[in-house]
Amino acid sequence: MYNKARNKQTDGQHDRQRGRLITFEGIDGSGKTTQIAHLSDSLGTAGIHVITLREPGGTAISEAVRDILLDLKHTGMFQETELLLFAAARAQLVREVFLPSLAKGHWIICDRYYDSTMAYQGYGRGLDLQAIRAINALATDQCRPDMTLLLDLPAELAAERMSQRSTAADRIDQENRDFMRRVRTGYLAIAAEEPERIIRMDAGQAEEALAQQIHRQIWEGFGI
């Protein structure tokens, strides 16, 4: 796991033999997809083998689960069903892609991971946090991110951005602002609990400025 010693490389050089898992979190509309693309390009230019993934998704099985979760027809889905489907997709992704790729020394950048479940299904839906932690532990096989970048944005600004998208909203996107406010509150609470792993970034700033801040955080944090 990534920890507070991340800035203290013993030899001043990053150990390229060890894979890294970087996750991006934030409410819908926070700009994760754009910033992941910027970071992936930068790391690739630095000679690092990068795999970009999303949750739910990343494998054939996980993508099939994603389709079920986000389909607008599934308005009758119970909250517990939603929670377990996210966990099922995650369990497949971790075992099929995360663990083998990290063992080969590859870097993974993932759009969402288990913090999303805590924020959306825990704080947003109101499901039991301890139960979610237990389910996440089983799904992830204790595979934890080395660093998590939380792109923080008020729900009102996120909704404004979402309204400008050309793609249709999915089942989760259609939740109201009160729900997104609860999710954001959850993210901030999670970040406060794990400041050594989760770094809050102001997602309201200009795209290029945010990309530069993320670049600096990664380069300094991992000693690239």
Image (tube, helix red, strand yellow):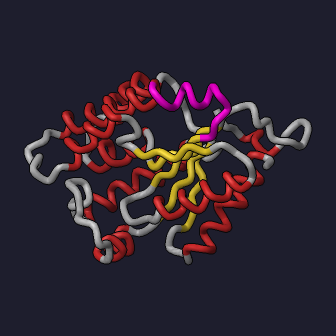
Single out the residue that lies furthest toward the right: 11
> Residue 7's x, y, as percent?
79, 46
The foreground one among 38 and 85 is 38
Quadrant for residue 56, please give it. Answer: top left
Q: Which residues are magenta?
A: 96-107
Residue 183, relative to residue 105: is it above or below? below
Residue 136 sits in quarter: top left
On screen, residue 166 above or below 15: below
Q: Position of residue 220 (x, y in %)?
A: 77, 53
- Residue 163 position, x and y percent, is 28, 75
Is 157 one of the magenta-colored residues?
no
| Quarter of the figure with the N terminus | top right
Asked if residue 88 lies left or right of residue 46, the reply is left
Q: Residue at x 86, y 42 (%)?
A: 13
97 in the magenta segment: yes
Q: Residue at x 63, y 74 (%)?
A: 209
Rendered residue at 75%/31% (across/down): 17
How many labels sit on residues? 0
Q: Main secondary structure of the magenta part?
A: helix
Q: Is residue 143 above or below residue 168?
A: above
Q: Nearer the viewer, residue 31 or 5?
A: 31
Q: At 36% from the left edge and 74% from the top edge, which residue is drawn?
A: 161
